[in-house]
């Protein structure tokens, strides 16, 4: 029996994720819908991109999904066969994935003349700097605190929380600390 002819194609998938920023503003009750839209546009221009945080629950198929016949790179990731319910894809080697890393994070809180250190465990496949900044920005409530320097003010500027540091740890250490340090 002769082997079925095959060809190589290069498939590219893209996904769009979202970053977002939120705030609650007290505005005049008689502002029109047009004025509110203008305010949103102004705030979009005013807010620094560093104040946005990743929204890992939002994914949208990107326009860059497609294929290319006879790719220049001849290495093969897997094979495809026609099956009853569609295509049967067998991957010879797993696609590159970003593994989540384990961390101990530290925040510093200033409450009047008193200072406190807060430690917490977290995992992320993204930027740990951004992760702890997001935790600091929402330390006292779901709405972001008022950004100032590296930290955030809460409760009419009586409380200040800033991200201080993070340390990557192995799974064994993370597991041992999990009963003693809160996981976020």
Image (cartoon, helix red, strand yellow):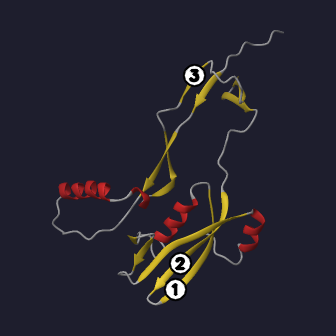
Occupied quadrant, residue 76: top right
Q: Residue furthest bottom?
A: 113
Q: Which mark's residue is nearer the viewer, 2 or 3? A: 2
Q: Residues within 10 Å of mark 3 (few under 14, many from 20)?
A: few
Separation of disc 2 and disc 3 at Cα? 51 Å
Separation of disc 1 and disc 2 at Cα? 7 Å
The residue where tag 3 is placed is 68
The relative height of residue 157 versus residue 138 in the rendered view (above or below) is below
Q: How many marks?
A: 3
Q: Residue furthest top?
A: 2
Q: Element under label 1?
A: strand
Q: Residue at x 49, y 89 (%)?
A: 114
Q: Residues within 10 Å of mark 2 (few under 14, many from 20)?
A: some
Contact, CB < 8 Å: mark 1 with mark 2? Answer: yes
Separation of disc 3 and disc 1 at Cα? 58 Å
Quadrant containing the N terminus in the rendered view? top right
Q: Residue at x 29, y 68 (%)?
A: 25
The relative height of residue 36 versus residue 60 in the rendered view (above or below) is below
Between discs 2 and 3, the one toward the N terminus: 3
| Residue 59 x/y as whole percent | 50, 46
The residue where tag 1 is placed is 115
The residue where tag 2 is placed is 108
Q: Element under label 2?
A: strand
Q: Residue at x 26, y 71 (%)?
A: 26
Between discs 3 and 1, the one toward the N terminus: 3
């Amino acid at each position: 029996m002769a082997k079925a002819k095959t060809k190589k194609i290069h498939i590219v998938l893209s996904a769009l994720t979202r970053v977002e920023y939120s705030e609650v503003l007290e505005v005049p009750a008689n502002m029109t819908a047009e004025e509110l839209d203008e305010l949103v546009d102004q705030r979009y221009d005013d807010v620094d991109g560093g104040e946005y945080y990743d929204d890992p629950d939002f994914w949208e198929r990107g326009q860059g999904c497609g294929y290319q016949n006879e790719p220049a790179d001849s290495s093969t990731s897997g094979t495809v066969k026609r099956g009853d319910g569609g295509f049967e894809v067998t991957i010879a080697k797993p696609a590159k994935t970003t593994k989540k890393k384990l961390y101990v994070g530290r925040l510093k809180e200033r409450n009047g003349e008193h200072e406190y250190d807060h430690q917490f465990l977290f995992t992320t496949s993204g930027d740990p700097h951004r992760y702890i900044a997001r935790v600091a920005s929402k330390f006292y409530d779901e709405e972001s605190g008022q950004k100032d320097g590296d930290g955030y003010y809460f409760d009419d500027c009586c409380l200040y929380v800033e991200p201080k540091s993070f340390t990557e740890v192995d799974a064994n250490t993370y597991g041992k600390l999990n009963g003693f340090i809160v996981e976020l």
